[in-house]
């Protein structure tokens, strides 16, 4: 009897230890899962650039949504009202094949795929667009940083031609560019008001532009830019980044922030530094928080970029040309074409 009672007590202790161990592991796993769901993206991002020719096998909206690494991390809670807007039906105006401006596949594989059919946090939207268009998600994060400091309330590119003003904008000059990545209404007929009201729609357009340009389908770029830097061709994603800003191919120089090459220089700089992961990036857009960030970095001049030490940080493109609703820094954007 005593031996049996001792065995039962020993087994009881084993079972108790097992339960405690499982409980501790379960709690650890739960904490890890919760932490993952609230974590920012890794510094390397989640997605890589897919090669030229990938356009026909890119994922659709739903498959791209399933590829997103979901997290509650949201450094721009002011974007929520725009992040939750999804166009019921977005139909961009097709381009004429007779114009010879674009490859005939542009209408089907680019304009026809831009939908804005996704809702989520700001970073989840970047991930969705990156997966959908076969692009690096860090590239989209970088462009959004340059264009708006990740704020969908961004607007600019003022025009004085009333015929170009979006519906509801009667006062001249009026803005024609809106959104977190600077999507220009006049370059994408049919996109307004979704480039203003929907973060996903605005980023979807950027994704489409970068993919189509990377595929070599923007034929009119062959007649633009600085030919001494090379003519437009498929496979140069950074040239497409510069063209999003300037509407030219490798135009200007790294010393000129208002040129395609200057924009590429800025994009390279900030893509390497991942400002969205730095302390102080998270902001509700309050004046106090923005004011504390005004000291870094500052806009640059040509003499700063050509210095020998290389210790001067180039300024963000966003510091020099956009009106941003609910933010104190407002300036008109210069020299944009596609974006």
Image (cartoon, helix red, strand yellow):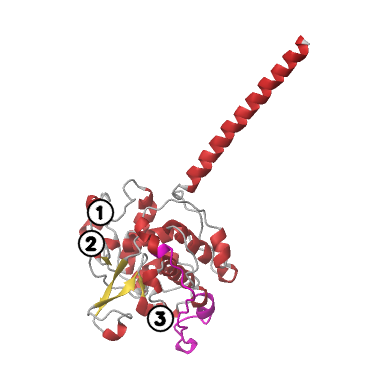
Please tell me whether residue 128 belongs to the stretch shown in magenta.
Answer: no
Query: In the depicted view, which residue is nearer to us: 232 or 64?
Result: 64
Q: The residue tagged with tag 1: helix, strand or loop? A: helix
Q: The residue tagged with tag 3: helix, strand or loop? A: loop
Q: Which residue is mark 2?
A: 329
Seen as rendered, the residue at the extreme top is 2
**Dot 1 alpha-carbon crowd within 10 angstroms: few under 14, some 14 to 19, many 20 or more:** some
User: Is label 2 in contact with label 1 (beta carbons under 8 Å)?
Assistant: yes
Q: Is residue 196 left or right of residue 35?
A: left
Residue 285 sits above or below residue 203 on the image: above
Query: In the depicted view, which residue is nearer to us: 328 or 130?
Result: 328
Asked whether the viewer can see residue 243, the reply is no
Q: Earlier in the sequence, mark 1 or mark 3?
A: 3
Q: Residue at x 26, y 77 (%)?
A: 174
Query: In the depicted view, which residue is nearer to us: 107 or 234?
Result: 107
Residue 30, picture quadrant: top right
Q: Residue at x 27, y 62 (%)?
A: 326
Q: Which residue is mark 1?
A: 290
Which stretch did the figure color magenta?
82-110
Q: Quadrant of the C terminus?
A: bottom left
Q: Which residue is mark 3?
A: 189
Please tell me whether residue 92 belongs to the stretch shown in magenta.
Answer: yes
């Amino acid at each position: 009897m005593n031996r049996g009672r001792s065995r039962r007590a020993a087994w009881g202790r084993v079972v108790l230890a097992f339960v405690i161990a499982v409980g501790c592991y379960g709690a650890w796993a739960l904490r890890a899962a919760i932490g993952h769901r609230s974590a920012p993206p890794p510094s390397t991002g989640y997605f890589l650039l897919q090669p030229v020719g990938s356009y026909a096998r890119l994922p659709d909206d739903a498959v791209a949504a399933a590829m997103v690494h979901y997290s509650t991390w949201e450094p721009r809670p002011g974007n929520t009202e725009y992040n939750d807007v999804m166009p019921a039906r977005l139909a961009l105006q097709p381009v004429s094949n007779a114009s010879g401006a674009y490859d005939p596949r542009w209408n089907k594989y680019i304009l026809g795929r831009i939908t804005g059919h996704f809702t989520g946090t700001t970073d989840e939207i970047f991930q969705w667009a990156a997966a959908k268009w076969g692009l690096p998600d860090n590239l989209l994060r970088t462009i959004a940083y340059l264009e708006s400091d990740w704020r969908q309330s961004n607007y600019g590119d003022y025009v004085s031609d009333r015929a170009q003003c979006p519906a509801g904008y009667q006062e001249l000059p009026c803005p024609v560019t809106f959104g977190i990545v600077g999507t220009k209404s006049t370059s994408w007929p049919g996109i307004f008001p979704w480039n203003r009201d929907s973060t996903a729609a605005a980023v979807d357009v950027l994704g489409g532009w970068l993919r189509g340009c990377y595929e070599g389908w923007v034929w009119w770029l062959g007649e633009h830019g600085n030919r001494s830097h090379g003519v437009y061709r498929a496979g140069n994603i950074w040239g497409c980044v510069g063209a999003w800003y300037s509407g030219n191919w490798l135009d200007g120089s790294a010393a000129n922030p208002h040129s395609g090459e200057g924009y590429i220089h800025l994009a390279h700089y900030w893509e390497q530094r991942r400002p969205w992961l730095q302390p102080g990036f998270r902001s509700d857009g309050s004046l106090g928080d923005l004011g504390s960030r005004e000291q870094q970095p500052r806009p640059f001049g040509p003499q700063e970029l050509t210095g020998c030490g290389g210790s001067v940080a180039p300024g963000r493109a966003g510091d020099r040309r956009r009106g941003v609703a609910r933010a104190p820094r407002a300036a008109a954007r210069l020299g944009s074409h596609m974006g």
